[in-house]
Image (tube, helix red, strand yellow):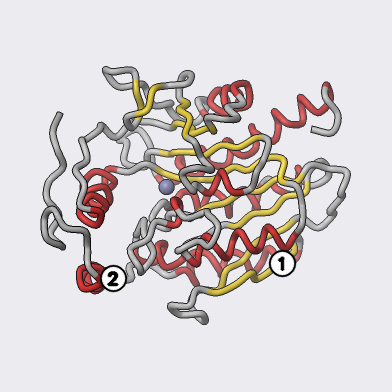
Amino acid sequence: MDHEQAYEIGTPGQKWTAEDKAAWLAKQTVVRTYQQEVLAKLTPLQQYFDIEQYGALSYDPARFPLFVVKTRDWNNANPTILVTGGVHGYETSGVQGAIRFIETQALKYSSAFNIIVAPCVSPWGYETINRWNPNAIDPNRSFVKNSPAEESAALMQCIADLNVTITAHIDLHETTDTDNSEFRPALAARDAVVHDNWDIPDGFYLVGDTLKPNTEFQTHIINAVSAVTHIAPADDSGRIIGEELAQFGVINYATKALGLCSGFSDCIYGTTTEVYPDSPLVDAENCIQAQVIAITSGLDYLSKISKIVPHI
Ligand SMILES: [Zn+2]
């Protein structure tokens, strides 16, 4: 198996120093704006939803205020659903899919569910097309107590302050070609470790939780998404990104132990979507639609089983 190429920053065999991290940060540039592509789309939604600021990133608080969008007709007898996008800011369809879900679907489900959407957890990453935050920390490994990533800490505090039980949590992500060309080599260099290459899967897949796999829930979402985009096949060793398949299109991770966003909420039903935007078979709109149907099909599944098992 090939090893990844050396990364241009740092000294091979040594973990990054503060100077190395500063050199990495100096290379990053703003290529799109959170204001135009996210905040401007939230403004008209104020008519129908409660939009609450839960913090602001310290790097530039005026530029990076953080918001959750909540359905209005809150009913404590209904299950509460959390949708998160942009934990990895570069994963565009996660952010735009969360917004599209609010714009087109959330109201339809608001009589049966209380819905909380955090559409862009890492706005600096959104603007600079980055997986890490400016301190070279991955927010999606930082949903832990005393988090080193303020993006993760702010969202966890926001949900804790709401004092609700999260029944289901759907975290919207992408797996991209730049994972192998940029982000995984940067990670290997930062930590002075060697990664074996894995193939980037061509298609949509889900990451469930090892301890709470919720097999039927994941199957229901995979089947629904397959109507709008193709599902990633396993590689020659029966794996996706190095992990054995739990079922077609699904792998499981120990989400809480790894500090993943989908693990922090202690939800009963959790999943992380992984859209592949670099496939020749899809475009940006198709990726957004895949994210939206992943959410709505998850909610449809919960509606279906709640008729059988009240108080899910
Ligand atoms: Zn991601």
| Lateral position of residue 119 relative to residue 160, left or right | left
Tell me residue 254's x, y (percent).
49, 36
With 192 as the anchor, is 298 left or right in this view?
Answer: right
Report which residue position mark 1 lands on.
Answer: 46
The answer to whether mark 1 and mark 2 are in CB contact below 8 A is: no
Residue matched to label 2: 29
Residue at figure coordinates x 35%, y 68% from the top left: 135
Horizontal side, residue 310 vs residue 81: left or right: right
Question: In the image, residue 66 lies at what x, y percent?
Answer: 57, 69
Q: Amino acid at mark 2?
A: Thr
Return the residue nearer the eye: 253 or 108: 253
Expressed as whole percent of the image width and height from the top left, the position of residue 131 reads 36, 56
Q: Is the residue at mark 1 in contact range of ligand 1, meaning its CB lies under 8 Å from it?
A: no
Question: 183 or 100: nearer the eye?
Answer: 183
- Secondary element under disc 2, as helix, strand or loop, is loop
Picture layout, residue 84 above or below residue 232: below
